[in-house]
Image (cartoon, grey):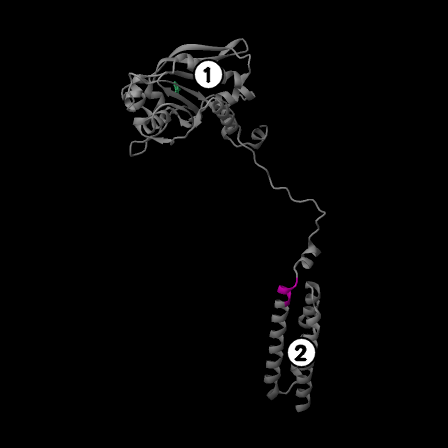
């Protein structure tokens, strides 16, 4: 049936011309999209021609089918290309309502322990102390020996934490950083070292196997015990207020001599806040300083303790549980 074929082929070429003209005029995402629906959609013009393929004789079906497929492919490519060329803003504007309120991403905040470390560091910064850090996995040398704590010293018990098979351990005090800095540098030194420490302690409301300390160290040829008193006095008044009363009590630490514990007046009583003292000459010797002429002081304080006092927190475990109801208060 030659007639049917001619008609089909005519129809196809007419449709092709029509489509080309129409597409040349389509200059927006929307018009190209309606063009696509008009030709390639379920009831589109080309789709209708495909449906007529059944009426074409068997011997001509192949060439007509090929023509239809060629046009279909051309149309699909033209639509694709056209959509890529027009400004997308038109399509976007249809679905984007700029007057609606946006989605607010959840906002985090700085952990109260970190805030406390920053507050304390800022006070010492103003007095010229530089902030340094040391590793949490330490050698026995930095954690004990260099700090004048011999192998058989009883105070090791409270400091014996987790050892690695290589004989290193989780540091039990930030005093390790004193040793690292002094071995690295020459006086004068003024540093503070915040960080985590570990203890073989059973967890309860006031103990944790991990907590935070801030170590302080000042070294040069003329540092005296009065400098220690002056610096700590100023620090504690900055932190707790100008009226704060302070008390120095004699104490013992292997790496300072003389040593003190420092209390602040709290209500009717006194509260221990930190440990301190003049650096023991044996420590200077361990790090290779001349112990006859080097002078210095060191101190160490517990961050959790101070945060608990400042904010009325009654259980140390709150710091580590990541309960947002607790954390959001600060
Ligand atoms: N390292 C001591 C402790 O953890 C504190 C301290 C530091 C004391 C420096 C004196 C000097 O208890």
Classify 10 Å Cα crowding around label 2: few (below 14), some (14-19), many (20 and above): some
Disc 1 vs disc 2: which is toward the camera?
1
Q: Position of residue 194 (x, y in %)?
A: 44, 27
The answer to whether residue 190 of the structure is visible from this angle is: yes
Judged from this view, the residue extending furthest toward the right is: 99
Q: Which residue is mark 2?
A: 16
Q: Tell me, yes or no, whether the highlighted magenta stretch contains residue 84.
A: yes
- At a point 69% along the width and 52% down the height, the residue shown is 96
Q: Quadrant of the N terminus?
A: bottom right
- At a point 69% along the width and 81% down the height, the residue shown is 14
Q: CA distance from mark 1 to mark 2?
A: 90 Å
Q: Position of residue 301 (x, y in %)?
A: 44, 20
Q: Position of residue 156 (x, y in %)?
A: 32, 21
Q: Quadrant of the C terminus?
A: top right
- Magenta residues span 82-86
Residue nearest the observer in this picture, 86 or 139: 86
Q: Determine the main secondary structure of the stretch shown in magenta.
A: helix
The answer to whether residue 149 of the structure is visible from this angle is: no
Residue 212 position by quadrant: top left
- At a point 71% along the width and 70% down the height, the residue shown is 25
Classify 10 Å Cα crowding around label 1: few (below 14), some (14-19), many (20 and above): some
Q: Tell me, yes or no, whether the highlighted magenta stretch contains residue 299.
A: no
Q: Which residue is mark 1?
A: 232
Lower sequence index among marks 1 and 2: 2
């Amino acid at each position: 049936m030659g007639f049917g074929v001619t008609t089909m082929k005519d129809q196809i070429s007419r449709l092709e011309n029509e489509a080309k003209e129409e597409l040349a005029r389509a200059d927006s995402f929307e018009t190209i999209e309606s063009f696509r629906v008009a030709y390639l959609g379920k009831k589109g013009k080309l789709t209708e021609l495909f449906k007529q393929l059944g009426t074409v004789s068997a011997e001509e079906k192949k060439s007509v089918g090929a023509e239809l497929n060629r046009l279909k492919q051309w149309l699909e490519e033209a639509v694709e290309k056209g959509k890529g060329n027009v400004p997308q803003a038109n399509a976007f504007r249809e679905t984007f309502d700029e007057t609606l309120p946006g989605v607010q991403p959840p906002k985090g905040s700085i952990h109260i322990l970190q805030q406390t470390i920053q507050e304390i560091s800022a006070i010492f910064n103003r007095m010229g102390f530089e902030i340094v850090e040391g590793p949490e996995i330490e050698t026995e040398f930095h954690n004990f020996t260099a700090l004048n704590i011999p192998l058989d010293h009883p105070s090791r018990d409270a400091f014996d934490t987790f050892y690695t098979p290589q004989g290193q351990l989780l540091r039990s005090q930030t005093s390790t950083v004193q040793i690292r800095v002094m071995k690295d540098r020459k006086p004068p030194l003024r540093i503070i070292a915040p960080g985590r420490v570990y203890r073989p302690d059973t967890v309860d409301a006031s103990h944790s196997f991990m907590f935070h300390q801030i170590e302080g160290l000042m070294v040069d040829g003329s540092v005296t015990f009065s400098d220690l008193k002056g610096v700590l006095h100023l620090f504690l008044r900055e932190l707790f207020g100008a009226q704060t009363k302070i008390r120095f009590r004699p104490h013992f630490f292997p790496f300072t001599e003389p040593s003190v514990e420092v209390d602040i007046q709290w209500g009717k009583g006194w509260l221990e806040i930190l440990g301190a003292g003049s650096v023991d000459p044996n420590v200077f010797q361990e790090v290779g300083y001349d112990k006859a002429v080097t002078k210095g002081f060191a101190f160490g304080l517990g961050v959790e303790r101070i945060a608990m006092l400042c904010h009325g927190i009654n259980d140390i475990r709150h710091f580590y549980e990541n309960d947002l109801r607790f954390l959001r208060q600060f």
